[in-house]
Every structure is written in structure tokens, then in C-alpha cells.
Amino acid sequence: MKIAATFRKITERIARTSSFRITLLAILSAMVVGAFIIILSDIDKLQNGDIIGAIRTVGSAYWALVVGSFGSLRAISATINSATPLILCGVSVAVAFKAGLFNIGATGQMLAGGMAALWVGFSMDGPGIIQVPLAVLAGAVGGAAYGAIPGILKARTGAHEVITTIMLNNMAGFLVLWLLKTNLFQRADRTDPISKLVSAPGHLPRLFGFLSDRPDLVAHAGFVVAILAVIVYWWFLNRSTTGFEFRAFGMNADAAQYAGMHTKRLTVMAMMFAGAFAGLAGSAEVLGTYGYASQNFAGNIGFDAIAIALLGRSTPLGTLLAALLFGALQAGGRQMQANTDVPIDLIVVLRALIVMFIAAPLLIKAIWRIKVAPTSLGQTFRGWGS
Amino acid sequence: MHLELRGITKRFPGVIANDNVNLTLKTGEVLCLIGENGAGKSTLMNVLYGMYKAEEGQILLDGSPVVFTSPADAIAAGIGMVHQHFMLVPVFTVAENVVLGVEPTGRLGSLNIDKAREMVREVSDRYNLNLDPDAIIEDLPVGVQQRVEIVKVLLRDAKVVVFDEPTAVLTPKEIIEFFEIVKTLIAAGRGVVFITHKLKEALSVADRIAVLRRGQVVGEVDPKNTTESKIAEMMVGRPVQLVVDKKPHAPGEVVLDVKDLSVVDADGRTMVDSVSFSVRAGEVVGIAGVQGNGQTELVDALTGLRHSARGKVALDGLDITDASPRERHAQGIAHVPEDRQRQGLVGGLSVAENLVLTRYHDDEFSNGIVMDWPAAHRVAESLISEYDIRTPSADIEASTLSGGNQQKVIVARELSRPLRLSIAAQPTRGVDVGSIEYIHSRIIKERDTGTAVLIVSTELDEVMALSDRLLVMYRGKIVADVDPRVTSAMDVGLYMAGSRPISASNGIAS
């Protein structure tokens, strides 16, 4: 009887602190569903009734994911390279979540920050010790400035940030296209929208630069910036006075106002902080990964970041781990496509499934037949018109 | 119908909400279920109503066991519930609301509204409810809305009607009418379960009183041979001081001076209408009134959360009409807000963080950029012990505390610094008897140190007991300024309802 009582106590405790477990089970569930998708997509083998072969495909596809993301120095480098902008944009969305705002505008802020960093990157020619920090900083400032726009609109007029940031993403895209056609930015010998090259000393140094025989290891110091950003985010939330205001405001805006906090100023600041982190992601891509800017250098990163912040429940460590996972899937997915016939699009499906399972803890409970307290997604955003 | 709950046990992770509860209800009797918040009253009724499934125990109707898996089962078995928060569609008529879900329909599924009207009229006449089937819900006073809920339950043929804190939203006059309705229900052979934490009401209406404490029935008493203090002692588990123990007050200089203040809400309606009054140092001024007569807006204007349309507010002679909440805080105004969940606390933050929620920016806790959390923790720990806040630690989320302890967190935060004016709105709403006693004594202690105190409460007993001077608000105006020691609760109740006692000698003060 005593053992039973102790056991119940332990399971109850797990049930109450289960968000990490739900996350793991969500990832596992997504992999299981993904396996069925791989089998179903392997039409040829299915038609021949080669079930064993189809299962073998699943095994080799998932094995390629692991090898391609962590199996070698080259794979780790690729994972780091993919994860860098995801970490920064993830923190961008997360910090806004903490203040009760939904930043869908990481893409636009990343473009704004990237262009600012690019401008410093090709205008100067060393010394690197000054130019690189200056260009990275320009990225943060550019992103913050672009993030300030929806913040001010919300504080002044109540315009919902979901609408304004989506619109500003579109505007940023066309703004970049226009800038890339101007004499200031466009590469001299080109007619297509492609920018001048960042001067050699202005590149973010390669992480594995000390291995002179491995020029294929592309990971760059943007990763260090990203790790520092996570640490700054942690410190800001838990130690700073403004971070405390963010948390109080995000969890209960009425109480924040009652407590005398300047909620309009906090709204603007939260969007600026979010923009600064996304801007850093833009500078990491331009100064580290590409060395120039093309029209769509932000890609889908700003949107993946929303899933990352949700998966990581907007905590500093959670966001970092979620971004590393997404980065690993990205890197491993390329290997998977090369080794097997499974297309890289499966990665997109897997990510979507993970987020779907995270959003439905009761579904996880039903599938795995465990006792899980229906936890919320942590801090998300306030409703429309509030 | 004979209803019996036998050995009901309901557990939630970490708590036993109901622990082997036995209760019976006979036809034609009023059983009052009394207990503090968190004692398990609502859980027990939700088990009966099919919302929760009990781990152990049985529900027996006329001796045979039944299992309810949803409220629909309970309703079908003849159990009806009138919730504390009404489930009505504000823009529908009384008849439309009453038949919602059991609509009388014509041959092609069209709504037979005449039939619905007829049904409402019939029940209304039989139980003397005096309802107009065509009235729109949002135009009706709360007391009438409650009667609509009662009709809903009766039309679904409930043999047992459960009322969850039914008097919380009613005026004194409506409460008396409500008790009449309960008597009619009993006379018609229905059983009534009445959940409350108000001792007076339990004594006046119940045939039997069951007292719940920490999930257990600690006793059943006959209201004829018991007293309020005996029941309170059973609820809390120790003797409780029910009257506020206070010395005569010694009012000093005017601290808060409100002149001709008007407040307009977002829709342009005047919620506070040219109100003037003052509060002196060492004096408790109470504002009584039925919920929604402008008290909320008045407090918001006094604390800087809402702009006043007209008029002047002065603290110690200094004009603070346009000061921000933080400026007012710095000048020594404390504010215990009326809704602690919405305003007073951030449930997701820790107890320690909530204890500094309005003071985190003070030099003591912050240099403007970095928080000094160790300092905040030291203050939190000392407040937790000084104000007897029952919490396992200062680091757990404030939302996990009981209502009484949450309120103590707010009171501790707001009163534990030098003050000029303390504004407390509904300081003991939803707070257990033991904590009420404590919060009241803190408020009087604050008065005795020379602070001006303004209490806004819809609980007439509370404002009567605490105040040295009592104002009554009705439709945005102050309609009475009386001495609570020489005025009867009945007279104040009449002012609250917008009429004047015949013997009004105090008249309407300015």
C-alpha cells in the first residue's frame, strides 16, 4: 500500500511538471506519423508488397537524419549553420510572447537588420575587429527600428501586431528588392537584384577556421552571437527590471497597468527587442552565411521561429533547444534526401506535426495513455482587440 | 425525491477536494452547504451535477444508485443548478432564454415562441416569480435575471434545485424576495441545496446546515439551536471574532478631498455623477452600494487608472486629478483592487514577485536596470510571516494560493509601507472567514496609525462594521452620508435600492 501511495505521489508530481515530457512525446509522435508517411510515399515498394523494404526505407531515412545532423564534424557544422538564425529569430518571437505580443514580423525585421549590416559590411574595409561588431550592431539597430513600427502602431492606435507585422513583412520584401536595384547596394557588374559583397575583413569569422584543411565547415561566429543572445535573453527576463515588467505585462496586462507600469512604452520596447534579435539573425546570414544579400535571404526563418518559440515555450533554454532541433532536421534532411528517395519536404511535415502535437497535449495523453495535466502553451499572446 | 450522497471522495493532483462526504436531502427541505472557499462545496455540487466524476462513493436517488457522466444526465434525473454566474443570452428575451435547448417546435422545426411564452407565464404564475416573457435579459436587474435561471431549472422539471452562492449579486431587498421564492419551491415539494459562506443567510433560510471544512463534513446543525459564531468556529476550526473590534476613531485633517468628480465610461455613459466627499486621517469611510452603481469607476478615478471627465481630486491639499497610478503610489496611496485575479495579482508570477508588484521599481529593489531579487525575497519572507500568508514557499506561483491567501498577499504589499490614504475595494470578496477577520483588523490598525481609509464594498455588513462614516452610492451619485452606528442595515439597504427610509433624518448629504 505504501509503495502504491509513493508511486501515485511520484506520477502526480510528473503530471504537474510534464511540459518537458509532453515535448519529448510530441517529437516521438511526430516521428511515428512521419514513418507512416514515408512508407505511404514509397508507392513502388508498396505496390510490390515489399513491406519490409518500405520499413527499411524508414530506418535508413531516419538514420540519415541523425548522421546528417550530428554524425560528423561537417554535419555538426551544417546543423550549427542552420540553427544560428533560427535561435535568434526564435528568441525574437519568444521575447515578444513574454510581453504578450505575437511577433509574426521576424522576417521583415531580419531583412531590415540584414540590409543595415550589409551596408556596414561593404562600405568599410576593416579592420575586422571594429567592422564586424559594428556591422552586427547595425543589424540589431536596423531590426529594432523596423520592430518599433508595429510597436508604436499598437501603443498609439491599438492596431493589432499580427496584422501590422504581416503587412510589414511584405513591405520589407519589396523594399529590399528596390534597395538591391539601387546604385548604393547593387553589385556593379550585375543587372539582377544582388548586392555588393561584404568586404573580406567584414565577414563573421568561421568557427572552424583553425582547421585549415577543412574549408567545407561553413559554421560561423554568428552562432556565438546567437548563444550570447540566449544568455542576454535569460538575464533580461530574470534579472532586469524591464524583464520583470515584460513578464508581468505579458501575463496580466490589467495588473501591469494597476501596478503603474507604462504599458504603452512596454509594448514598443517589446517589439523593438524582438526586432533587434531578428535583426541579428539577418546580420548573421548576410555577414556569415552568404557574404552578400539577395532578394529572399530571410527565407522562411521568421515563420519557423514562431514554431520554435512555441515548442520551447518561450523560455531561453527551451527556445535554444528547439532551434537546435529544427536546425538539425534541416541539416539532416539534406543528407536524407541524398541517401534515400525521401524528399526533404518530409522535414517540413515533421516540424508541423511536432508543433501540432505540442498544441494538443490531450491528444498526446490519449495516444500514450498517460496522465498528463492539460498544460497551456506557456505564455502566448493576447486575443484580438485587447 | 430523496437524494443521498454516500461516501463521496474526489481527488485532484495534490488535494483531496471531497473526503468521504455523506449528505442527504429530503423533499421539501432546504439544505444549506456552508464552508470557506476551497472547502469543497462547489466540487461536491459539480460531482452531483455530473461535471466531475468522484473516485469513490455513490449518488442515490430514492434509494437506488445513479451514475451521472454529464450535466445532461443530472438534469434528466431531476437535478437543476443555478450557477453563480448566470448562463443567459443577454440580447434574447426571457422566453427565448428559458426554452434554449428545449425549444417547443412546430411541424417543420420552426420555433413556437407563443408556446414558450405560455410556458414561462405558467411557471412564473405558479411560483410567484412575476416575469415578463418578452423582456430582454440585458434590460433586467440581476435579481430578475436570477429568476429567469430559476424558471429554466423548473421547466426542466428539477426536483432538486442547487443554488451556488445565489445572494452574492443581489441587493438586500432582492435577497428577501429570493428567500420567498425558495419557500415557494419548498411548498411545491422540491428540495433545495443552498451553497453559501454567509452565516446570516444560512441561519435564516435553512432547515439543516451542513458545514464543510477541508473537504469533509465536519458537522450538521439545526439552525434553531445554533449561533453564527458556533458555525463560524466549525468552518474555520477555531473560535472566530465576527464583530470588528475597534476603538472610537479620532479623525484628523482632511487627506482625500474629492470635489464634483464625474467619470464617463467608454460608451459615453456617466458612471460617476458629480460626487463630492472627503476622507480624514484616522477615519474609515465606507462606500456601500449594489455592484455597478459607479463604485468601480470612482475607485479607478481615485487611483489614476481612469481619467475623470470633470472635477478635482486632492491629496493633502495637492491636486492629483491627473497624476498617474505610479505618482499616486509614490505619494502614499495604497490600492487593494476589487478584482484580485484581474488586477491585483499576476497569477503566473511567484508569491515573492507579486509581493513587490507595485514596489519593484523602488530603490530598495532595483537600481533602475537590475532587480535586486535577494532583497525582494527578504522582504517577501518577512511579509509572508508577518501577514500569515499560507504558502509552501515564496517561489510558487501566486495562482496556486487560496483566495484568502491571495488577498493577504495584496493586503501585505499595499499596507506594508508608510501611507497617507488606503483605498480598498471589496477587500474580503471570496475570502474565508479566518482571513476576513485578519484583513479587517489590519485595516483598522492602519486607521489607528493615522491613515485615511476608504472602503468600497457591496457587502453591507462589512462596510457597516468597518466604517466610521458611511456613504451610499446609487446610479453614480452619493445618495446618503450616515453614521453606521445609529443607522439600521435596513435603512442603508433602502438607500442602496434608490429609495429613502420613511424615517430619514440624516437626509441626503452633499
Image (tube, coloured by chain):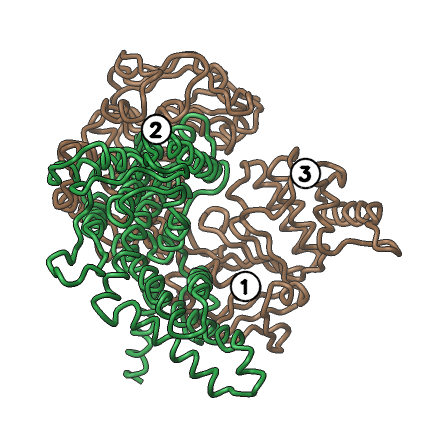
Tag 1 and tag 3 share a subunit: yes
CA gap, disc 1 and disc 3: 27 Å
Q: Circle 1 is placed at which residue position?
A: B51
CB of mark 2 within 8 Å of CB of mark 1? Answer: no
Residue kind at label 2, given as amino acid type: Asn
Nearest to the eye among marks 1 and 3: give it. Answer: 3
Q: Residues within 10 Å of mark 3 (few under 14, many from 20)?
A: few
Camera-side residue: B386 or A253?
Answer: A253
**Residue drawn 44% across and 76% down?**
A369
CA gap, disc 2 and disc 3: 63 Å
**Furthest residue in direction front, as rendered:** A189
Q: Among the chains, which one is green?
A: A
Left-right relation of B363 to A36:
left
Image quadrant assignment for residue B442: top left
Q: Chain of mark 1?
A: B
Tag 2 and tag 3 share a subunit: no
Depicted B509 relative to depicted B427: above or below: above
The kind of secondary structure element at disc 2 is loop
Q: Circle 3 is placed at which residue position?
A: B91
Q: Chain of mark 2?
A: A
